[in-house]
Image (spheres, coloured by chain):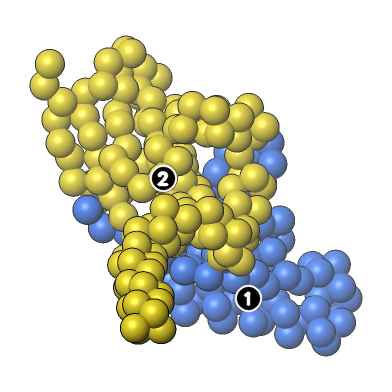
């Protein structure tokens, strides 16, 4: 799942990695959509984190469809 | 005469009601805000991101303590609502940090933002933060 923080809470895109691997067109489209949003948010300065229960949070530079959950936070500045 | 008096009284009450309605709204706004869709979604993400113990700490103490991944004696105290993040070293507040998103976010998302940045991006987090040193 990709979760992008915004003023609306967070926008979510989900996909089924197993179905995408066997060529399911809907699952592949969902992965591509998530990848597109990931790239778009990164271009705006967002930071992406791989967040999985029981594992340390990891900052990622590239979209990873195998991640259970990716959380993207908007660009931050000193206040 | 009586009708005019009644009309003026009613008008007076309307004026009073209009005058105090912004104050009433300011008092009630946080409760309505808590019910908004954005806040609910942000609260879901917060619950998914925190352990039950961390969630309890945030609820009851009003802040979340995030240990520094690089400095064992350092803890970041993230408030539940908007405000400074305190840097605690060896039990003493040494600094306050101000870091904010360029986009307005619900309060619960702001807590998650700080937590993720500190845990996985501490160096950049500290670079971006405006720092206010605490002096005893």
Q: Nearer the viewer, residue A56 or B44?
A: B44
* Percent coordinates x, y for residue B135 in the rendering: 11, 21
Image quadrant of residue B39?
bottom right
Residue found 46% across the figure and 74% down from its top: A41
Q: Specify the colour of chain B.
A: yellow
Residue found 41% across the figure and 45% down from its top: B81
**Residue occupied by mark 1:** A34
Image quadrant of residue B1?
bottom left
Residue B39 visible? The answer is no
Label 1: element kind:
helix
* Percent coordinates x, y for residue A9 in the rendering: 55, 64
Tell me if label 2 and label 1 are in contact, CB under 8 Å. Answer: no
Q: Nearer the viewer, residue A77 or B84?
A: B84
Image quarter hosting the C terminus of chain B: top left
* Percent coordinates x, y for residue B130 in the rendering: 18, 46
Q: Which mark is residue B81?
A: 2
Q: Specify the colour of chain A.
A: blue
Q: Nearer the viewer, residue A63 or B72?
A: B72
Number of the front mark, 2 or 1: 2
Same chain for labels 2 and 1? Say yes or no. no
């Amino acid at each position: 799942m990709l979760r992008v923080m915004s003023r609306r809470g967070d926008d979510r895109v989900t996909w089924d990695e197993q179905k995408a691997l066997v060529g399911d067109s809907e699952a592949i489209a969902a992965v591509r959509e998530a990848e597109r949003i990931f790239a778009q948010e990164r271009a705006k300065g967002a930071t992406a984190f791989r967040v999985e229960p029981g594992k340390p949070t990891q900052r990622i530079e590239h979209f990873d469809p195998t991640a259970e959950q990716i959380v993207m936070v908007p660009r931050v500045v000193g206040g | 005469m009586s009708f005019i008096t009644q009309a003026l009284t009613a008008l007076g009450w309307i004026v009073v009601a209009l005058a105090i309605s912004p104050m009433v709204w300011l008092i009630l706004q946080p409760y309505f805000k808590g019910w908004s869709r954005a806040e609910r979604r942000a609260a879901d993400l917060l619950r998914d991101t925190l352990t039950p113990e961390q969630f309890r700490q945030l609820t009851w103490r009003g802040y979340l303590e995030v240990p520094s991944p690089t400095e064992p004696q350092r803890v970041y105290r993230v408030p539940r609502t908007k405000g400074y993040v305190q840097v605690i070293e060896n039990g003493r507040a040494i600094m306050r940090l101000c870091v904010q998103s360029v986009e307005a976010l619900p309060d619960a998302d702001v807590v998650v933002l700080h937590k993720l940045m500190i845990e996985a991006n501490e160096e950049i987090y500290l670079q971006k933060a405006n720092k206010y040193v605490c002096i005893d």
